[in-house]
């Protein structure tokens, strides 16, 4: 529920609304885009980053919070384990029960491999489940994989790895077809044509959606299919360290049963990391849209085993995290809200940026509005934000549009007495997506033999910035590719003796480089919250 | 100084004093728990955090998502960390979207006694009893539509006297409907064929060969739908 | 004329094409506005003998109360559903323990005490519209066709509660047939039970009942049989003897199929009655 002061400010929004309806705010010129990014995007806050002191990426800058976890001791430093007697022994070990993991497991299974999927929380408790907006694919007549390619690489500021972008856009329609055949309930018209919309940075309407539960619909379908296919799944079982064999190839993982707190050995011929992102590290103190388990475990484990990080100095902030009411601070307001025509407004009810700039530019512009220009709207909890004028949507597309197309959003705000059909939302950028990750090739393979990475855990596809709808896409494109490849590759793997020498070596390297780990242990596995801030008024 | 409003809550019977502004989930953490089960998305999408509670003095047993329900004074609560459910295994490819497709796998839907307990507890406000009624009469389209927002939290099944696992019934309906009754997208089929024939191989190859300056020109001058 | 309409599951799964679709089509042609209830659940199809459990009545009461709230009579088509809804309505009318318990449980905005009305489609034609009005709309009279109505028990009994027709000598289907221009055939057993509840367990007994009924009608020169109940229909069709070609000796129709034929509306529903 908004305060009286806020309701007063909303009157200004209502006053300017008729004049703004249907009027397109100009997009930024390339020059201005660069400027606003340089001055206001958190990636350019020098203090938020520091260079790594050890490992393959020694000298490269990453967010401080991540550097602290990378430069920490392993959880199994003092655990005695019998590597000769593994609890699990499979062809393909998939780590992570999100969309990438599910797609990889199904694809590896399709190659005839014996697959085990382990995941930290429940199968499907993942960022994938939360994606609302949609998934991109160039499958309409006025669109093509080339146009999609250009959007991806321009959105990524021309830093993306070209071969990965090609794989992404080329496989996209195939992925949608696959989902369609699995009975994914996409929004369609009566002829079966997909209802597609714009997303930030797209030049064609290619965002496919399943109302505003797109990720959930994909995730629950893949999960259902994984159960139908009899894939072995172990929940509340986190991977804490990779296992290599004596030749330095990936050969399994050390698992941790969260409930019994027991460490277990899983041996596998090929390993697929699909552990998702790192929002729960709260870089620079930002609230996050991510699920509870997004703690960068995959980056930490992979890095310790010698895989390379790429683009970890760039993080995506979603321009529209909820800033109020406080119970939903950081909750994602899906980009679809802007896709349908809602626009950001300052305290005077005036628009200050086109509503569909790329996310980094849009976020930076909102931060500028609130900091330099001081035109943000203050909340009683000491936050500041800008309006997102959602009632415009029903004005543009007709009454009932919000109810039909944004049921999740409507419900989320209604739980705290804000009716988004009638009043604007208050938003501020939130930590949303890890643009980089472990470097992969077109097959999801890393430089470590038999180690694959897929999904948000991987890096290179999106360069320095990902467009909405390309992540749900990438987790499936590369989840499938990694699954197929790992499922084939395992047939020729001759496992040597298992080894954790790389962990010992890593500890040695930390010492040699004078890193004081200050008692830090990683991966983090679960965040710890105490909510003391709620004691402040 | 303004006082922060605090309330007494009872987590599995044990008392804690927490700020009134918190959700149940945050209150659990405020009280000192580090959640393992019962916490996923923290935003109402995953269904991990089903919680049952009673307010002291009130007869009614209430339920809610811990991540989306505020604490109240004298709330007695416990999370449901896991709920055993029957999920039938099927091969979607060989099924037909017939009237009885669901009943073939979940005949127990006919044991529904219409008590409406499921609808009463659903945190997504779905008309659960009604979507089961649609399933009974083989109306896949309506069952799919009415159950769309289901986050599979399990609360309905936890209250069902007929032992129905509503959310698994619903996903079968949705998959059948989307696979067989919604027409397949014609433009998608076409594009997949084009890609298989290699229509975009050369153009993509050409784009990959361009340097950044060339790409910038193309990107900045691309037409926007 | 606007009515709430309760179809029931059987019409949605099995008897849709031959019982429901023609019924809805005929209603449109006759200017009757039948609006399917937005929400309804299975009524159980069998009226429970024990009334100490309230669960079996809940779906029926919800539908009855919703129609009442809309100020409309509730029209049924399936004889089994009609039986359940009508008897449930009666049970709630007569101030029973079931009435209190059900209302306590449902917590409706306004308690339901049987003030709504349930009518079967045949009653709708007879009492609300009038067979004379039906006759006026007939374009293709079924002249010369000798048809035997079969009632079964669900619509008629218990007679006091169902109050459908004279339970010993019902006329409603005969009168309908006359209005459609056909010749009703009088024969014994037309109100006898067809044994459908037995057919599940004891097909032999049910079969002999059906054969008895069919033979009686044939003996009186019937060329077809007409009925209003999906359960009887199933039994009558499947348990009677077959011709060497595998066809039933006596064709069996729903009254709605004859109705659309006589109203000249067969294109959309397919005329299977000629
Ligand atoms: C709120 C929100 C909205 C979004 N909206 C969109 C959108 O509209 N379109 C789009 O394209 N993208 C969107 N994204 C991004 C996209 O959803 C994610 O990037 C993508 O789903 C990641 O998939 P994943 O399988 O790689 O990781 P996840 O889905 O996060 O899965 C990772 C899994 O690994 C598990 N795990 C983590 N650590 C361990 C461990 N140590 N051991 C074992 N398992 C572990 C986790 O529990 C989880 O199950 C959104 C993201 C969020 C958070
Ligand atoms: S239908 Fe059942 S499982 Fe689905 S959200 Fe509602 S209560 Fe939860
Ligand atoms: S809880 Fe079970 S029995 Fe009761 S209405 Fe729902 S599905 Fe039917
Ligand atoms: S934690 Fe996912 S619904 Fe509450």
Image (cartoon, rainbow, N blue to C red):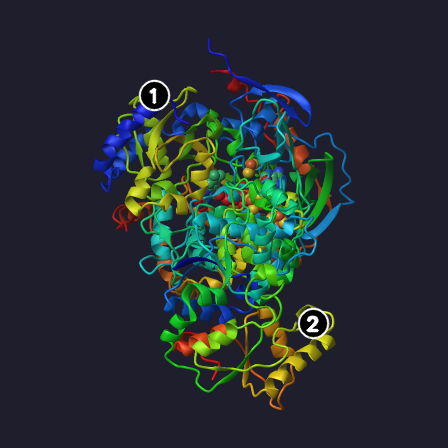
Q: Residues within 10 Å of mark 2 (few under 14, many from 20)?
A: some
Q: B214 above or below C76?
A: above
Residue highlighted by disc 1: A5
Looking at the image, can residue A10 be seen? yes
Disc 2 within 8 angstroms of ligand 3 (CB): no
**Ligand 2 falls in quadrant:** top right
| In-image side of C242 versus A58 (left or right) | right
The total of numbered circles placed on residues is 2
Task: List x then y, in percent, for residue C210.
Answer: 66, 78
The structure residue drawn at horizontal position 40% and vertical position 72%, both measured from the top left corner, is C132
| In-image side of B156 versus C66 (left or right) | right
Closest to the observer, A469 or A212: A212
| In-image side of B90 versus A208 (left or right) | right
| In-image side of A203 versus C199 (left or right) | left
Q: C32 above or below A69?
A: below
Mark 2–mark 1 Cα distance, whole angstroms, equals 73 Å
Q: Residue furthest bottom?
A: C244
Helix, strand or loop status at disc 1 = helix
The structure residue drawn at horizontal position 30% and vertical position 25%, both measured from the top left corner, is A9
Give the letter of the chain under mark 2.
C
Residue highlighted by disc 2: C199
Helix, strand or loop status at disc 2 = helix
Give the letter of the chain under mark 1.
A
Q: Which mark is residue C43?
A: none
């Amino acid at each position: 529920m908004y305060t009286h002061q806020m309701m007063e400010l909303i009157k200004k929004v209502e006053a300017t609304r008729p004049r703004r309806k249907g009027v397109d705010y100009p997009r930024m010129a390339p020059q201005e885009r660069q400027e606003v990014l340089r001055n206001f995007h958190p990636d350019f806050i020098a203090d938020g980053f520091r260079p790594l002191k050890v490992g393959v990426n020694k000298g490269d800058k990453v967010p401080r919070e991540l550097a602290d976890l990378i430069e920490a001791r392993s959880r199994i430093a003092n655990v005695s384990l019998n590597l000769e007697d593994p609890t699990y022994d499979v062809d393909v070990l998939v780590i992570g029960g999100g969309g990438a993991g599910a797609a990889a497991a199904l694809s590896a299974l399709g190659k005839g491999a014996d697959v085990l999927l382990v995941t930290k929380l429940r199968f499907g408790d993942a960022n994938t489940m939360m994606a609302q907006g949609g998934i991109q694919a160039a499958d309409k007549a006025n669109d093509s994989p080339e146009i999609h390619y250009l959007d991806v690489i321009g959105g990524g500021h021309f830093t993306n790895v070209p071969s990965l972008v090609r794989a992404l856009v080329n496989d996209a329609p195939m992925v949608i077809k696959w989902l369609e055949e699995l009975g994914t309930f996409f929004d369609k018209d009566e002829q079966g044509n997909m209802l597609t919309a714009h997303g930030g940075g797209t030049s064609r309407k290619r965002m496919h959606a399943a109302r505003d539960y797109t990720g959930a619909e994909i995730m629950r379908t893949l999960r259902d299919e994984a159960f139908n296919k009899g894939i072995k799944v172990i929940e509340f079982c986190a991977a804490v360290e990779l296992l290599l064999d004596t030749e330095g190839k990936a050969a399994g993982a050390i698992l941790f049963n969260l409930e019994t707190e027991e460490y277990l050995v899983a041996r596998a011929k090929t390993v697929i990391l699909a552990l998702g992102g790192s929002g729960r590290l709260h870089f620079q103190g930002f609230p996050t849209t991510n699920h509870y388990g997004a703690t960068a475990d995959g980056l930490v484990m992979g890095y310790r085993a010698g895989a390379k990080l790429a683009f970890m100095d760039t993080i995506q902030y979603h321009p529209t995290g909820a800033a109020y009411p406080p119970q939903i601070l950081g909750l994602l307001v899906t980009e679809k809200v802007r896709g349908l025509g809602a626009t950001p407004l300052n305290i005077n009810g005036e628009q200050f940026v086109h509503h569909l700039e790329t996310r980094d530019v849009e976020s930076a512009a909102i931060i500028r509005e609130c900091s330099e220009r001081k035109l943000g709207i203050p909340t009683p909890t000491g936050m500041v934000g800008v309006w997102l004028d959602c009632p415009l949507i029903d004005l543009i597309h007709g009454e009932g549009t919000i109810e039909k197309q944004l049921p999740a959003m409507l419900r989320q705000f209604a739980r705290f007495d804000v009716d988004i059909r009638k009043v604007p939302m208050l938003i501020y950028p939130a930590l949303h997506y890890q643009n980089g990750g472990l470097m992969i090739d077109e097959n999801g393979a890393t430089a470590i033999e038999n180690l694959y990475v897929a999904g948000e855990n991987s890096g290179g596809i999106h360069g320095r910035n990902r467009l909405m709808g390309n992540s749900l896409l990438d987790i499936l494109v590369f989840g499938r590719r990694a699954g197929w490849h790992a499922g084939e590759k395992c047939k020729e793997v001759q496992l040597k003796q298992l080894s954790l020498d790389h962990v010992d070596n890593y500890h040695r390297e930390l010492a040699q480089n004078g890193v004081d780990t200050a008692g830090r242990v990683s991966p983090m596995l679960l965040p710890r919250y105490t909510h003391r801030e709620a004691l402040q008024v | 100084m303004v006082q922060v409003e605090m309330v007494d809550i009872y987590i599995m019977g044990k008392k804690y004093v927490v700020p009134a502004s918190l959700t149940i989930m945050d209150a659990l953490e405020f009280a000192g728990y580090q959640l393992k089960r019962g916490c996923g998305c923290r935003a109402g999408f995953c269904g991990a955090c089903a919680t049952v509670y009673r307010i002291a003095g009130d007869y009614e047993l209430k339920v809610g998502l811990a991540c989306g329900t505020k604490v109240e004074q004298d709330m007695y609560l416990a999370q449901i960390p896991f709920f055993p459910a029957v999920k039938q295994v099927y091969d979607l490819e060989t099924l037909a979207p017939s009237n009885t497709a669901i009943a073939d796998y979940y005949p127990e839907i006919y044991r529904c006694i219409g008590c409406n307990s499921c609808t009463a507890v659903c945190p997504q406000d779905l008309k659960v009893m009604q979507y089961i009624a649609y399933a009974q009469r083989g109306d896949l389209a309506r069952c799919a539509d009415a159950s769309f927002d289901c986050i599979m939290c399990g609360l309905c099944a936890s209250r069902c006297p007929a032992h129905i696992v509503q959310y698994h019934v619903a996903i079968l309906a949705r998959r059948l409907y989307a696979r067989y009754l919604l027409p397949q997208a014609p433009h998608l089929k076409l594009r997949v064929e084009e890609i298989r024939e290699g229509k975009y191989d050369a153009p993509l190859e050409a784009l990959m060969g361009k340097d950044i300056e060339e790409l910038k020109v193309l990107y900045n001058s691309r037409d926007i739908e | 004329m606007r009515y709430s309409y309760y179809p029931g599951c059987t019409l949605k799964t099995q008897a849709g094409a031959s019982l429901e679709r023609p019924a809805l089509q005929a209603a449109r042609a006759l200017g009757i506005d039948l609006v399917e209830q937005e929400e309804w659940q299975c009524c159980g199809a069998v009226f429970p003998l024990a009334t100490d459990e309230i669960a079996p009545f809940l779906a029926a009461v919800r539908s009855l109360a919703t129609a009442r709230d809309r100020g409309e009579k509730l029209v049924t088509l399936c004889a089994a559903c009609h039986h359940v809804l009508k008897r449930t309505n009666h049970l709630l009318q007569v101030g029973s323990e079931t009435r209190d318990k059900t209302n306590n449980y449902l917590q409706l905005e306004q308690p339901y005490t049987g003030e709504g009305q349930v009518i079967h489609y045949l009653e709708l034609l007879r009492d609300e519209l009038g067979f004379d009005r039906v006759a006026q709309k007939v374009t293709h009279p079924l002249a010369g066709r000798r048809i035997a109505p079969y009632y079964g028990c669900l619509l008629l009994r218990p007679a006091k509660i169902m109050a459908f027709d004279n339970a010993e000598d019902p006329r409603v289907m005969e009168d309908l047939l006359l209005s459609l221009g056909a010749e009703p055939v009088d024969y014994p057993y037309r109100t006898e039970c067809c044994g459908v509840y037995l057919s599940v367990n004891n097909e032999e007994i049910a079969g002999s009942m059906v054969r008895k009924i069919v033979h009686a009608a044939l003996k009186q020169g019937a060329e077809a049989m007409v009925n209003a109940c999906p359960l009887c229909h199933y039994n009558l069709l499947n348990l009677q003897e077959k011709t060497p070609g595998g066809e039933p000796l006596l064709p069996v129709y729903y009254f709605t199929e004859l109705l659309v034929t006589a109203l000249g509306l067969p294109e959309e529903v397919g005329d299977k009655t000629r």
